[in-house]
Amino acid sequence: MNLTESEISALSALEQGIPAIPRPYEELARTAGMAEKEFIEILKNLVSRGIVRRLGARINHYNAGFMHNAMVVFCVSEEDADEAAESLSASPSVSHCYLRPGFPGFKYNLYAMVHAGSSQDLEKSISDLAGECGINDFIILRSLREFKKSPPVICKDKD
Amino acid sequence: MAQRKKLDAVDKALLNRLQDGFPIEPRPYKKIGEELGIDESEVLERLEALIDCGIIRSIGGTVASDKIGRFTALAATKVPGEKIEQAVSIINSYPEVTHNYERDHEYNIWFTINAESREKAEEIISNIKSKAGLDEIQLLPALKTYKIKVKFDL
């Protein structure tokens, strides 16, 4: 999908984050070199086209009390993948669910990110999820350390 | 920064409201305040406190990378304990690397990459391998995306 120059400028300004001031779009518009009204119109349009998927606060789930998370990876056949994934995705404790290729020495291909407030809740969620999706062949990869979490830099060359 | 903050009911309501559908109009915080029954100034004060204590990373938009033709993938590699620090600093030096976690598995370093093209991502992977002295990095693009949720109910 092609973006216009103004849309790229607006996205680039948006990447800095929406400031906590009464008229945040006025400031972003200034960065993007346009009027506040134009910035707002462009942003509305980008959201309605699904290019900006979610506008809002990015929360740090560790600090918000969701300190326990794991990447649970299931081994599913191609024909069972959709049904298992639908079951996993229906759970509020699963934030992300993807089918990815397996690779030599790693047969697991269905990925679910599971979040909970305590390690007991996490254990329980995972065993419930496995039971509900009917796939018993899985492993749990807990996160030991977070080294980086930042939004993608999409427009860095454009301004 | 990561000191714990006791959230009251208004903070929780604000956090839930702020996570999606941020108003696109000249005074967005005034609009949110009206919805929650508090003043714009109180919204801003509480928001600043939530940012200061590290619960909110930032307010912004998530760009649907696939819709603008970008290549995204998860990458997995094995890094011996004594080399983790060096490898992580090499991996994280690329702005295309957006998340990076150590996990309790033989494949212990898992990072995500968001690049302008598959070729660019492969070039970065190959540079990381040679700079960090890694034999193997598996690049795992999603074959199907079933769920992307970033909203947490508080």
Image (tube, coloured by chain):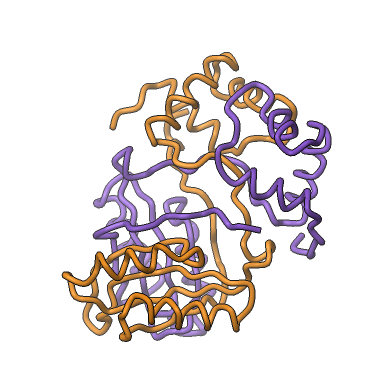
Q: Is residue B90 visible?
A: no
Above or below, B92 against B120 in this view is below
Q: Residue furthest left?
A: A79
* A45 or B76, nearer to the observer: A45
Residue B143 position, x and y percent, is 24, 60
- Residue A133 lies in quadrant: bottom left
Q: Chain A, which colour?
A: orange
Relative placement, left or right, of B131 versus A19 is left
Q: Give the residue displayed 51% in from the left and 49% down from the top.
A: A151
- Residue A49 lies in quadrant: top left
Q: Is residue B43 visible?
A: yes
Relative placement, left or right, of B1 versus A122 is right
Q: Give the residue displayed 61% in from the left and 57% down from the top.
A: B153
Relative placement, left or right, of A150 versus A51 is right
Residue B86 position, x and y percent, is 51, 72
* B99 or B61, nearer to the observer: B61
Above or below, A147 against B16 in this view is below
Quadrant, the N terminus of chain A: top left
Q: Give the residue displayed 26% in from the left and 58% down from the top.
A: B144
Q: Chain B, which colour?
A: purple
